[in-house]
Image: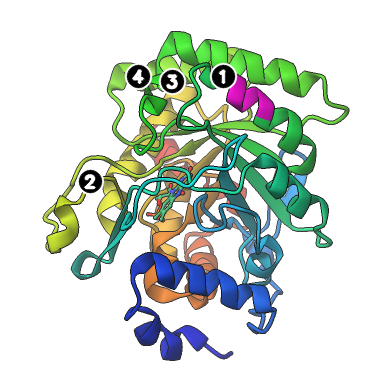
Amino acid sequence: MLDYYRFAGPLIRLLSAEAAHNLSVAILKTGLVPPQPRADDPALKIALWGREFPNPIGLAAGYDKNAEVPDALLAQGFGFVEIGTVTPEPQPGNPKPRLFRLVEDKAVINRMGFNNDGMQRVAGRLARRRCAGTVGVNLGKNKTTEDAAADYEKGARVLGPLSDYLVINVSSPNTPGLRALQGRAALEDLVGRVRRVLSELPVSPPLLLKIAPDLTDQDQRDIVDVALAAGLDGLVVTNTTIARPGELRSANKAETGGLSGPPLFDPSTRMLGDIHRLTGGRLPLIGVGGVTTGAQAYAKIRAGASLVQLYTALIYHGTAQVTRIKRDLAALLRRDGFRKLSDAVGADHASVG
Ligand SMILES: Cc1cc2nc3c(=O)[nH]c(=O)nc-3n(C[C@H](O)[C@H](O)[C@H](O)COP(=O)(O)O)c2cc1C
């Protein structure tokens, strides 16, 4: 297998982080990147929401914000891809620079601010897709919209019919007021309104909510109550953190924005476990935050994730890392006697009792 990133990676890192990102999307768009081996180990299969995932390792939101390359990403071995965040109207996001590498920590801080092409252009691209893999759509609000729920309703109406699952993103730290939508009353209203829109569609996709790692215990209990009462189909745990956990070594640690990558692994996995416990395993969870290795993907699954996502690991290791993660995850499942992935979901809680 050609690991083009081993050769191109050092060159790509000479560019600013955002220019490197744009270049990597442009390279994928050419269609010239050789696909990774497709045949996934059967032990990695998992069925959820009536669909089969060939493996549980997905690309997190924020890489392909505009649905430019979902199929090329699936061909790189991801089990699913989440595009977005998409807002109703196009918007430029925050002034540059707004994406910072923390090289010594293998982490990233971003304050992109939902730069995206808007839902109509993204809808056009999704409608032209020809491949079958699972693509979820992550919805947000425009910076200047006052009735936030109205933006999510618009997104659900236009992009719901084109998505395999929808995510209400109320957890990005770079849109003023957004995370306040995680409060009980605002969330009940928001989820109820989006649910009503989806109920009017001929086919309604599963609806998930993506939450921040910086929530109090009470916030978490409220979210789980609302999620169960409103019949949400899952939670994505977590987005980037506004905290600066651990001993960050990079000078860029002082930048404003959301931190992702290895320093986020422990807090986001702890929250994943807490949410799994609070839901009693009744809600499918997507575990995201700091996953770089197969062992870390496995830890997310044992903590309660049915699916796992990553983004920052891609910045430092390229898409070949997905193949390594899948290989190591399959070996770990076998080592511990799990014949299928679903048996390992939440295993840490079962052993604790
Ligand atoms: C540059 C960048 C942009 C992101 N944009 C979004 C976004 O638009 N919407 C979203 O829900 N999450 C976004 N995220 C968060 C990721 O989806 C993910 O939750 C987070 O980075 C933690 O995973 P990781 O440690 O594997 O990167 C972004 C992350 C990064 C690094």
CB within 8 Å, label 3 to label 4: no
Q: How far across and down, in percent of the image, does residue 280 sit? A: 49, 25
For the residues bearing labels 4 and 1, Cβ distance under 8 angstroms: no
**Residue 328: x percent and y percent?**
48, 71
The quarter holding residue 154 reads top right
Depth-wise, is mark 4 or mark 1 nearer the camera?
Answer: 1
Above or below residue 298? Residue 342 is: above
Q: Mark 2 or mark 3: name the one nearer the start of the chain.
A: 3
Q: Residues within 10 Å of mark 1 (few under 14, many from 20)?
A: many
User: Does residue 209 sit above or below 194 in this rendering?
Assistant: below
Q: What element carries label 4?
A: helix
Span highlighted in magenta in the image: 149-154
Query: In screen coordinates, is 195 left or right of 24?
Result: right
Residue beneath the point at 58% across and 12% down:
229
Q: Which amino acid does label 2 sit on?
A: Thr
Q: Main secondary structure of the magenta part?
A: helix
Q: Which of marks 4 and 2 is nearer the N terminus?
A: 4
Q: Which amino acid does label 3 sit on?
A: Leu
- Which residue in the protein does label 2 denote? 256
- Image location (x, y in percent) of residue 167: 59, 36
Residue with the mark numbered 1: 149
The span from disc 4 to disc 1 (Cα, nearest Å) is 19 Å
